[in-house]
Image: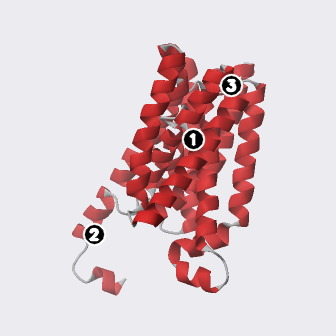
């Protein structure tokens, strides 16, 4: 019986990754799972959760333009997406500073323009299949070139985030103190937005521009139900993203489901369960507080 159980587990958990396309998809999704969630945590702490969604659309015109120029050439499409995202971030920041409008309002406006422009470019130069590939990605179609690019960008994000980590934390909590130490908060903010753009550029090939932000934000918001400490949020968000990536790929293989949506939906299930049963700010936590006798908090 034990041998049968081991054989079943091997068939379900290990055997699918004997195929090269599954192995590449696993490595790509694990690389993104290490780089994206910490960025999502900082976006959440800075009250910029929807900025990530806006930035995911901001890269679409560049990706579409790269597609029209070179077809499905990942380096060209990635370069176009990166330049487009950085340009939109720069324009939104400039409009915010010159007009006094909130940055999130400016970003929302530019994201709508970017989305419409990107869809129009792809529709003019390709088919609906091409548009679906750009918008939703195909992690099982990741080749060696894409894998190297994703791993390189993810490594760069992790290293850069480690270098600016302390400045980024201070910039979130006390920008005036950071400025008094001779560090420009705008520079740290700009580098951070650049990392977000890089991450979304790496993720569009696997999850598409519309869902790449899901692996960034869902694990981060899920971790918020379990921890209030920064190191706990970042560690838990990475673990949740890794679990969703592995589970989504296995579900995709065994049930013939789209891989990208399977990964994001698993992360969504984790979010919903955490919203109900989590230790912090969840439904269960609220019920526990209501059931606690009056003054119990003080005695504790």
Residue 3 seen by the camera: no
What residue does disc 1 label?
Answer: 243
Circle 2: is it few (<14), some (14-19), or many (20+) Cα within 10 Å?
few
* Residue drawn 51% across the image and 25% down it: 121
Task: Tell me the CA gap for discs 2 and 1.
Answer: 30 Å
User: Which of the two residues, 98 or 44, is positioned nearer the viewer here?
Assistant: 98
N-term-proximal mark, 2 vs 3: 3
Q: Quadrant of residue 74?
A: top right
What residue does disc 3 label?
Answer: 142
* Front of the two marks 2 and 1: 1
* Residue drawn 61% across the image and 27% down it: 139
**In-image side of 148 versus 225 (left or right):** right
Q: Quadrant of residue 242?
A: top right
User: Which of the two residues, 251 or 177, is positioned nearer the viewer here?
Assistant: 177
Element under label 3? Answer: loop
Task: Tell me the CA gap for discs 1 and 3.
Answer: 20 Å
N-term-proximal mark, 2 vs 1: 1
Circle 3: is it few (<14), some (14-19), or many (20+) Cα within 10 Å?
many
What residue does disc 2 label?
Answer: 289
State how many labels appear: 3
* Quadrant location of the C terminus in the rendered image: bottom left
User: Which of the two residues, 241 or 109, is positioned nearer the viewer here?
Assistant: 109
């Amino acid at each position: 019986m034990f041998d049968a159980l081991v054989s079943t587990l091997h068939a379900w958990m290990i055997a699918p990754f004997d195929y090269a396309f599954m192995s590449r998809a696993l490595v790509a999704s694990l690389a993104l799972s290490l780089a994206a969630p910490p960025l999502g945590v900082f976006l959440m702490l800075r009250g910029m959760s929807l900025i990530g969604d806006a930035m995911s659309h901001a890269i679409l015109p560049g990706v579409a333009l790269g597609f029209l120029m070179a077809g499905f050439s990942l380096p060209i499409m990635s370069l176009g997406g990166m330049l487009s995202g950085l340009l939109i971030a720069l324009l939104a920041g400039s409009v915010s500073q010159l007009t006094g409008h909130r940055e999130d309002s400016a970003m929302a406006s530019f994201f709508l323009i970017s989305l419409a422009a990107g869809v129009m470019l792809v529709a003019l130069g390709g088919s609906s299949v091409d548009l679906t590939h750009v918008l939703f990605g195909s992690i099982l179609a990741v080749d060696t070139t894409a894998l190297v690019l994703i791993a390189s960008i993810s490594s760069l994000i992790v290293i850069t985030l480690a270098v600016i980590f302390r400045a980024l934390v201070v910039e979130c909590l006390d920008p005036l103190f950071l400025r008094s130490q001779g560090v420009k908060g705008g520079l740290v903010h700009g580098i951070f937005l650049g990392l977000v753009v890089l991450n979304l550029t790496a993720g569009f090939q696997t999850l598409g521009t519309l869902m790449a932000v899901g692996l960034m934000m869902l694990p981060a918001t899920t971790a918020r139900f379990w921890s209030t400490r920064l190191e706990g949020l970042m560690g838990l968000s990475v673990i949740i993203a890794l679990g969703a990536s592995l589970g989504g790929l296995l579900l995709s293989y065994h049930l013939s489901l789209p891989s990208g949506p399977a990964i994001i939906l698993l992360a969504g299930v984790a979010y919903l369960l955490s919203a109900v049963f989590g230790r912090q700010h969840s439904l269960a936590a609220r019920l526990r507080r209501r059931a606690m006798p009056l003054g119990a908090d003080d005695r504790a």
